[in-house]
Amino acid sequence: APGVFQLASLLVELDPSDEASRILCADALYQMGCVEEAHKLLSVALSRNPQRSPILARLALLQLKKGFMYDGNQLLKKVIRIGDTSCLLPIMDIFKDEDRRLMQRHCHVRALTILK
């Protein structure tokens, strides 16, 4: 993760508008346990493109991880409204096991609540 972060940071430095490099940088920060820094980077990316599902889904996980269930729900709802949920499976590979279980459990509980 540190090497990926260094490379992604360099790419962001070379092209500040490169969204993919920002996401890669945020993923590396997340893997290194720098959740707040990843959140800040994703927030900047979201401000530039508020309809990007990969960014919203990552932010949703970070919000759930911090215990902000309402905010996480709102971000997940936005991903669903946009209709681009194809980003969720590849993102699950990036998440740590405990966070993957958190997201799956949260989504399952929300789905049951909606069905009731």
Image: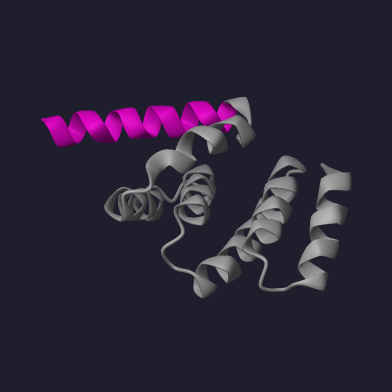
Relative image position of residue 17 (x, y in whole percent): 66, 73
> Is residue 34 visible from the viewing direction of this image?
no
Give the x, y percent position of residue 102: 48, 31
Q: Is residue 53 above or below residue 46?
A: above
Lateral position of residue 66 relative to residue 68, left or right:
right
Residue located at (44% from left, 68% from top): 50
Q: Is residue 1 visible?
A: yes
* Magenta run includes residue 110: yes
Colour approach in the figure: one colour
Q: Is residue 101 magenta?
A: yes
Residue that extends furthest to the left in the rendered view of this protein: 116
Decide: is 94 above or below 17: above
Residue shown at 53% from the left, 30% from the top: 100
Q: Residue at x 51, y 53 (%)?
A: 59
Q: Position of residue 84 (x, y in %)?
A: 38, 48
Magenta region, mostly helix, strand or loop? helix
The N terminus lies in which quarter of the figure? top right
Q: How many marks?
A: 0
Residues drawn in magenta: 98-116
Residue drawn at x 66%, y 51% is 35
Q: Name the residue nearer the viewer: 47 or 74.
A: 47
In the rendering, at what x and y percent does residue 52 appear?
Answer: 46, 59
Quarter of the rendering occupied by the C terminus: top left
